[in-house]
Amino acid sequence: MTDYKIKRGDSLWKIVKKELKIDNNAEISKKVREIAELNGLKNMNSIFVGQHLKLYKDQEKPAPTKTPDRSPCFVFNTIDSPVDMYCPNNVQFNGQKRLASSPFLKSRTESRMNQEAERASDNQEKIKIESSQQNQQVETQTVKLTTNNIHNLDITTDYKGKASEIDKHLGGVLKGQGEKFMQLQDKYGINAAFLAAIAINESRNGTSYSARKRNNVGGIRYAGSYRFRTYQNVSDCLEDMASMLKRNYINKGRKTIKAVGAKYCPIDDKSDKDQLNQYWPRNVGKYMKDIINNTASTA
């Protein structure tokens, strides 16, 4: 730039520093005096908007910057050396052209693309393996229930253990019924540990009089009566209990221990002379928790 048009807010000092890129204060002062002398300014501060100033003497004009002959994609070394970067268009270097579609560039490009594809495939496989390992950890993780959260558990969720693990908690006439509880879970969609917990609570774990004499391990009465029903075997009683829970409880939205207990064993039951029904949710929850956590035996 040899000629400059003054703009609002300009000063010779600002022009030299901004337009001529001079940062040294001494050099700026020197250049300001030169511009003032070159343009016949008696007062260096007496400039006005729109005024044109010469910044250099004719012999001091800066030499034009030569634009290097560069191709769109930078190529290292000489034309005879290997090309280190792939160019999507023709490569031009020192006036010569090297086609990107040449066998050399094509092979280099295909090789690099194959390497990137292999890396992407390896990364995807690694992600799959890590995801599988995480899923296995989640599946094998034992969820420990507490007295506080057992009562909020949805009793329609499946018990993830085995029949043999339920059997560890069963006594009296309930012994060996673990497989039956698992079958009822599959048939009616009710947690097997919950069904077992009810039976344990209602039959004093298979040792009550009704359990031994009537095969009634569910505390089930005849409709409209306080008399307990008699079954041919324990399996029939458990089948009747699960079917009744499905029809009259689960299908009507009662899906927690507390919700089931309010109807199954109500606190206003006139036959509950000792007022023990109020403990039904707590006791069933404890037995269910013990089975799921597999921490205690109720035998």
Image: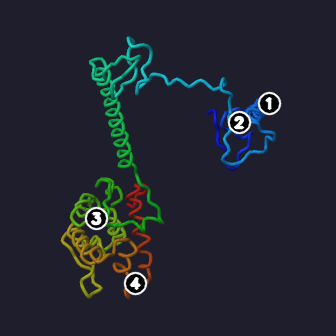
Whether tag 4 and tag 2 are in contact, CB under 8 A, the answer is: no
In depth, the one of 258 and 278 nearer the eye is 258
Q: Which mark is residue 16?
A: 2
Kind of residue at badge 2 = Val
Q: Residues within 10 Å of mark 1 (few under 14, many from 20)?
A: few
- Residue at the image position 73 percent from the left and 36 percent from the top: 39
What is the x, y in percent for residue 156?
Answer: 31, 66
Q: Residues within 10 Å of mark 4 (few under 14, many from 20)?
A: few
Kind of residue at badge 1 = Ala
**Residue situated furthest front in the rendering:** 40
Q: Nearer the viewer, mark 4 or mark 2?
A: 2
Which callout, 3 or 1, points at the residue further toward the start of the chain? 1
Q: Secondary structure at mark 4?
A: loop
Which callout, 1 or 4, points at the residue further toward the start of the chain? 1
What is the x, y in percent for residue 276?
Answer: 43, 79
**What is the spatial separation of the Cα atoms under label 4 and label 2, in whole angstroms?**
103 Å
**What is the spatial separation of the Cα atoms under label 1 and label 4, in whole angstroms?**
106 Å
Kind of residue at badge 3 = Val
Which callout, 2 or 3, points at the residue further toward the start of the chain? 2
Q: Residues within 10 Å of mark 2 (few under 14, many from 20)?
A: many
- In the picture of the structure, the residue carrying the numbered disc 4 is 272
- In the picture of the structure, the residue carrying the numbered disc 3 is 173
